[in-house]
Image (cartoon, rainbow, N blue to C red):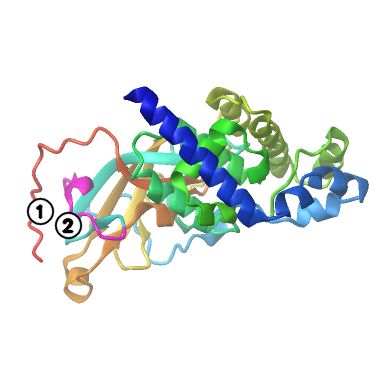
Amino acid sequence: MKTQKKIATLIAFMFYVAAAQAQFGGLGKKILDKGTEMASGGGVSKILKQPQAITTSFKDVNKTGSKPPSFIEGQQPDPLYLLPKAPGGGFKLCAGFFEMTNKSYCLHAGTHGPSTGDGYMLAPVLGPKADVVILILKNAEKHPEVKQRSIQVLLWAIVARTRFADFGTDIKLTATTLLSPQELLMLEGGALGVLPAGLIAKAKDQLPPAAQSVFEAENNIRQLAASGNASYEEMEKYAMLAGIAPQPDPEVPSGIWSLHPDGYYIRYFPRVYSVTNVQIYVPKELINTKPDLVYDGPKGIACPANVGSQRLAQTNEPLNADYSKKLKTICTP
């Protein structure tokens, strides 16, 4: 049975890749030597002007209406994952205090993992690859057979602006499992080839120190992604900076509450970049005016005030969920 499933998966993979390549037309060939073309064309300025795949930074955080960590202190949360699922993904909210430990993903290569004391706030998913990243995170929930590490490798390849044509077989298999042929088209555009060492050095000279490590890490990840045998551990070595990030911002303490655009409050406690505890507080008066509220994790990023730390994509996938528990909160329709 397992062999049959593997064969079926490979056949589907070949079909999807063929379909995607047919839709790409000559695009893959046209950009095949993009990195070399930029180098020969004196393209340092062109490279530096290209936007990151995901551009979200703490500047995109709306701190209006935020609350201190002591907000609703003493209350005990209910499991968020016990709330009804929404048709489009996420959880239907009702008045109360909820939490969930969920899968999360690094979306900022060449930075530090979460540090003690870091304050994280809600930020929108922005950038040329925002839509496809959200799709991957939402579709992953429907494919529990795809490991979290495989999805992280795919996301690292995307944030590093790796071309779909350069993806190794394993990364392509993950992409084609989670995305339709039409959605795969979203992976092209704004991508870079592996850049020569001389060009990397010239570009780094024009970047501030904090951006240099990100720029170099992305090129190393592109090289690994294109090698065809990149492991999670190898990519993590470039994506994660060793040591501790600079001091946390004292004005954004750990446990600070963000006011969501829909009116409820949310905060994040990352354990490591792959695991985040999310807490949500929904005021009763809000539900009286907005009865159809939904929390959809992938549509927001846990963004650190500490610029040396990683922004973290969120999911609707709980870890260590205990479905034998019962909601203490009474949610009325």
Q: Quick check: is 68 in the magenta stretch?
A: no
Q: Is residue 16 visible?
A: yes
Q: Is residue 178 left or right of residue 37?
A: left
Question: Mark number for residue 224?
Answer: none
Quadrant of residue 322 in the image? Answer: top left
Tell me the crowding category of disc 1: few under 14, some 14 to 19, or many 20 or more residues within 10 angstroms, Cα based.
Answer: some
How many numbered circles does the render carry?
Answer: 2
Task: Give the extent of the magenta segment.
Answer: 73-88
- Location of the C terminus by quadrant is bottom left
Location of mark 2 (residue) = 96
Q: Is residue 106 visible?
A: no
Q: Residue at the spot x=66%, y=30% of the render?
A: 224
> In the structure shown, which secondary structural element does the residue marked by tag 2 occupy?
strand
Location of mark 1 (residue) = 329
Instruction: Say which amino acid is labelled 2.
Output: Gly
Q: Is residue 90 left or right of residue 245?
A: left
Q: Work out whether residue 22 or residue 243 is closer to the camera in this orientation and state it.
A: 22
Q: Are marks 1 and 2 in contact (CB under 8 Å)?
A: yes
Where does residue 292 sit, x and y in percent of width and height?
22, 69
Of marks 1 and 2, which one's residue comes earlier in the chain? 2
